[in-house]
Amino acid sequence: MKNFNTHDSFLQRFRTFWLIALMVIVTGCSSVKLAYNNGDTLLYWWLNAYLDLDSDQASEVKKDIDDLFNWHRKTQLKTYVQLLETAKRQLAGNLTQADLLADYKEAKTRTELLAQRALPELTELAMTIKPDQLEQMEKKFKKNNETYRKKFMTGSVEERQKQRYKKSMEQLELWFGNFSRDQEAQLRKASDARPLDNQIWLDERIRRQQKILAALRKVHAEKLNKEATGALMQGLVRDIFERMESPERKAFFDTYIDSTTQFILTATRIATPEQKAHAQKRMQGWIEDFNTLAAAQK
């Protein structure tokens, strides 16, 4: 499984072209079942890399992650099937920008629901975090930011556009298979039309990290109770989902979403019947995987 680049790819930042693509691509797997069945382990490894959890925390976190996945399996996977069924119908018809924006809003709603479901567990964990773990988290943030700068903020504009285009094509090819040179030229033009300002993405990344660290330090320094800590965690989640509407960023994000939908529409409009059939087959396979996962008892 290869790593998925999350800096501002159209699937990660835009959260559209249908929700479950994110789960598959985040692990680089073509199998939903493989990605999903390893999701609890991957989530634990990711969290542990930031906090170096002690034995007591690790035990609770593993249980909380297991509970979260059980809830998700029982209550959310059928919704993903519905989203994919909608995507199949849209692809077979005349997909519009309005369709994509509606898909985006539904995916955002599903993501927010997941975040809200995890809030009590995040609150409990926040109350146990120690100063040395906060230092570990801060170092991890700084290391990741430096990696981001090296990957996405060096080279010419042309080089950075090409890199972004290549990442986007990897994702489109997962859906549609290979594209012709003429199709690739049209997609490159649509990709380059998207605003390219990696400094904004980095600034937002650092801003979010600082808010997380400040909140956790406040919990520790003031020995906040569960209610106060929960309110802080709720504020962090709300800030993440409302950030695209903030006055200083709204224009950029609106433009990015508009140009990204146009990029996706370009791909669907130039796709051949064979490529659309490839995408339909891929989606049907994922639908079957989700139905199997939803029916499974863990």
Image: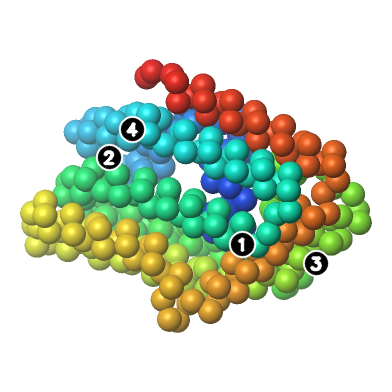
Front of the two marks 1 and 2: 1
Residue at (49, 76) in percent of width and height: 250
Residue at (58, 47) in percent of width and height: 18
The circle drawn on residue 296 is none
Q: Are marks 3 and 2 in contact (CB under 8 Å)?
A: no
Disc 3 from disc 4: Cα separation: 42 Å
Front of the two marks 3 and 4: 4
- Of labels 3 and 4, earlier in sequence is 4
Front-most of residues 199 and 20: 20
Q: If the image is split into quadrants, where does the C terminus sit?
A: top left
Q: How is the image coloured?
A: rainbow
Disc 4 from disc 2: Cα separation: 24 Å
Q: Secondary structure at mark 1?
A: helix
- The residue under label 4 is 71
- Of labels 4 and 2, earlier in sequence is 2
- The residue under label 1 is 98
Front of the two marks 3 and 2: 3
- Of labels 1 and 2, earlier in sequence is 2
- Of labels 3 and 1, earlier in sequence is 1
- The residue under label 3 is 189
Disc 3 from disc 1: Cα separation: 22 Å
Compared to 157, does 286 lie above or below?
Answer: above
Q: Is residue 163 visible?
A: no
Disc 4 from disc 1: Cα separation: 31 Å
Left or right of 118 on screen, residue 21: right
Front-most of residues 63 and 253: 253
Disc 1 from disc 2: Cα separation: 44 Å
Quarter of the image holding residue 44?
top left
Residue 281 in the image: x percent, y percent?
Answer: 72, 32
- The residue under label 2 is 53
- Rate crowding at label 4 as few (under 14), some (14 to 19) or many (20 or more) other CA atoms within 10 Å: some
